[in-house]
Image (spheres, rainbow, N blue to C red):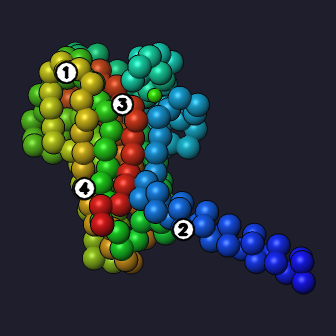
Amino acid sequence: MKSKLIITGICASLIAVISTSSMAADVLFEENFNAVQLDNWRNKESASISAAEGINGSACVKFDLPVGQSAQGAMITLALDVNKFRGKKIKLEAMMKGQGITKAGKDYLGPKLMLYFKSPAGQVWEDQTKKSGTFDWEKFTAAATIPANAEVLELVLGMQGCQGALWVDDIKITVVE
Ligand SMILES: [Ca+2]
């Protein structure tokens, strides 16, 4: 009888923990680059981890495309667990800093903080408002509604159709509703 009570107590605690964590669980993804390399990212050679140039002297990811070189883009891609995101309206945010970023020829080109997803309805790219030139740390956001039948979801960072230097830190994806 006593053990049954204890088990009941444990179950109640577990339920409390689960419900607390699900209330706080509107954060679906976070990355501050403080303790990771880019091993899980595709095209990781296009970027580097800068040990102390991030927010408050922390590590961040850096893209460096000197103006005048032939390369017109540098992007890295991380596959996200699409199961966690299906059917949800989400917000992607990150801090970004730019130096001498050249103006790209089209509206969708430039620094990239982007979600890419694919479902039977097709492919979608959602990214942040573009900014070129030199700017200090600034929060950028992008929003997307991930279809319930999405097959692929990826996070893309970098620069497309432009040159200069870009730093990215404190990435977060949250559920909007
Ligand atoms: Ca950081």
Residue 57, picture quadrant: top left
Q: Secondary structure at mark 3?
A: strand
Residue beneath disc 2: 19
Mark 1, Cα crowd under 10 Å, few <14 / some 14-19 / many 20+, is some
Residue beneath disc 3: 168
Q: Earlier in the sequence, mark 4 or mark 2?
A: 2
Residues at marks 1 and 4, CA–CA distance in whole angstroms: 22 Å
Q: Earlier in the sequence, mark 3 or mark 4?
A: 4
What amino acid type is highlighted by mark number 3? Answer: Val
Residue drawn at x 54%, y 60% is: 21
The quadrant of the rendering that contains the N terminus is: bottom right
Numbered disc in front, either 3 or 2: 2
Residues at marks 2 and 1, CA–CA distance in whole angstroms: 41 Å
Residue beneath disc 4: 143
The answer to whether 73 appears left or right of 42 in the picture is left
150 shown above or below 91: below
